[in-house]
Image (tube, rainbow, N blue to C red):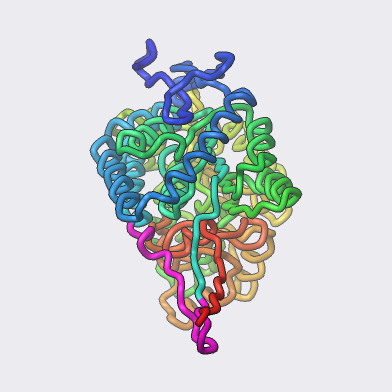
Amino acid sequence: MTTDHGHPAVRMYIAGEWCQGETGRTAPIVNPATEEVIGDVPLATTADLDRALDAAAQGFQVWRATPVTERTRILHTAADLIAERAAEIGRTATREQGKPLRESTGEARRTAATLRWHADDARRAYGRIIPTDPGTVLTVRREPIGPVAAFVPWNFPVGGPNRKISSALAAGCSLVIKASEETPASAMELVRCYADAGLPPGVLNLVFGEPAEVSEHLIASPVTRLVAFTGSVPVGKLLAARSGQVMKPSLMELGGHAPVIVCADADPVTAARTAARAKWANAGQVCTSPSRFLVHASLVEEFTAEFVKAAEAVTVGDGLDASTTMGPLANERRLKAMERLTADAVAHGAEIRTGGERLDRPGWFFAPTVITGVPEDAELLSEEPFGPLAPIVAFHDLDEALALANSLPYGLAAYGFTDSAATAERLSAELEAGILSVNHCGGSVHEAPSGGVKDSGYGREGGPEALDAYLITKRVSHLLVP
């Protein structure tokens, strides 16, 4: 079923049924490229949330008892469906979030690959036997922690929810996930693939609602055994504190302010082109997006000239237009943040080399922006822009660059460009980040862990570590009776 605008009609998914919610409360869904309302999202009441929690409690008992071969089969079937529907899912995501269609479709395809990885990891949740005294069998077992309450943002409307869903289900957990009210149909179409694959009712429940109301209710419930969150640092700290008050573990994938160090021996043109491609992806609305460009003084002008050239080559427009290489910002809040951060940088003496303003057209479009001479006290160097702003700062020696890179309380991603193996090793050892890319700006991959340090959170998603948060470790000591 679709709306009058051709957008999927959004429903919640509770206990194996698609539903509107107890009261019919809704909020509008807005296309960021046109500012047009394209649908409505139902908002859950506490009664809806309680039904979802009850369903997750019952679904957990079913799912944890399901043979791992059957669990894996169902998850692989869901991955096949996601891959088959990638074009349709991608179009839905672009209409809701704004990113170019090829980015949205690629996200859906990567989502299927991630699910396949985690499905196979269900077979690798190994325990062990520990040598001990004769007559005693000492073992360590890994078991699913229980029902999960998950919360995800809007910037990756398919891949974001799936990282939580696929890990939890592979581990044998059930979950209630609150996806973003700004990109609800994308999450709904993802969940539909799991439902159509034969996932038992109650194992996966999708809700929307007022964020504070939903998080408070789900975290406080005795049904919930783990809280998994991706989002901003302030909200993450609030949810982590709330989880701690009721002694529940949490997985926190929070924001960052990723430094890029371009060393004196790097190729400035290659570094600029590589970093610029990463900067404009998803209009900079990526928690690992390169966002502070620290360039050796001997290279800074050549690097800046190439970065400006790359920015001016970007085609900004509706993500559904095949010629578009960067879409709009996802909401008006991001647009206002770009205007505020740019104005503050200029007020502190920075120079706009290109961009720096909202585009004069309908939609939440902001020009790719390169800013130089940004002083340390400008907000742009301490606050994650989460948008298409690229501040460039010159440094004179690597000690200075590392000190500046590590000066913030964040530590999610970092990047470095160098032709020296020794310098690359120093960057690896001294940059305070959970993710480091040298001579490229690659994104997350399903076979390796991602996550932050310091205020950027704790726990890991991806790789063998992805299931750790969703499993408990149980020691069993069995004294054999003669």
Position of residue 361 measured from the top left corner of the image (x, y, whole percent) = 47, 21
Is residue 141 highlighted in magenta? no
Residue beneath the point at 31% across and 50% down = 70
Residue beneath the point at 36% across and 39% down = 199
Q: Is residue 180 above or below residue 285?
A: above
Residue beneath the point at 67% across and 30% down = 213
Q: Left of 64 or right of it: where is 396?
A: right
On the question of residue 268 being in view, the answer is: no
Q: Work out which residue is located at the far right of the displayed protein and give it.
A: 245
Say which of 16 and 463 sits in front.
Answer: 16
Q: Work out which residue is located at the far front of the displayed protein and give it.
A: 482
Q: Left of 102 or right of it: where is 434?
A: right
On the question of residue 416 being in view, the answer is: yes
Q: Left of 433 or right of it: where is 247?
A: right
Position of residue 409 measured from the top left corner of the image (x, y, whole percent) = 69, 59
Span highlighted in magenta in the image = 120-138
Q: How many marks?
A: 0
Position of residue 41 measured from the top left corner of the image (x, y, whole percent) = 51, 21
Q: Work out which residue is located at the far top of the displayed protein and give it.
A: 4
Q: Is residue 69 above or below residue 385?
A: below
Where, quadrant-wise, is the N terminus in this rendering? Answer: top left
Q: Left of 65 or right of it: where is 348?
A: right
Is residue 137 highlighted in magenta? yes
Say which of 128 and 314 sits in front.
Answer: 128
Say which of 302 and 134 sits in front.
Answer: 134
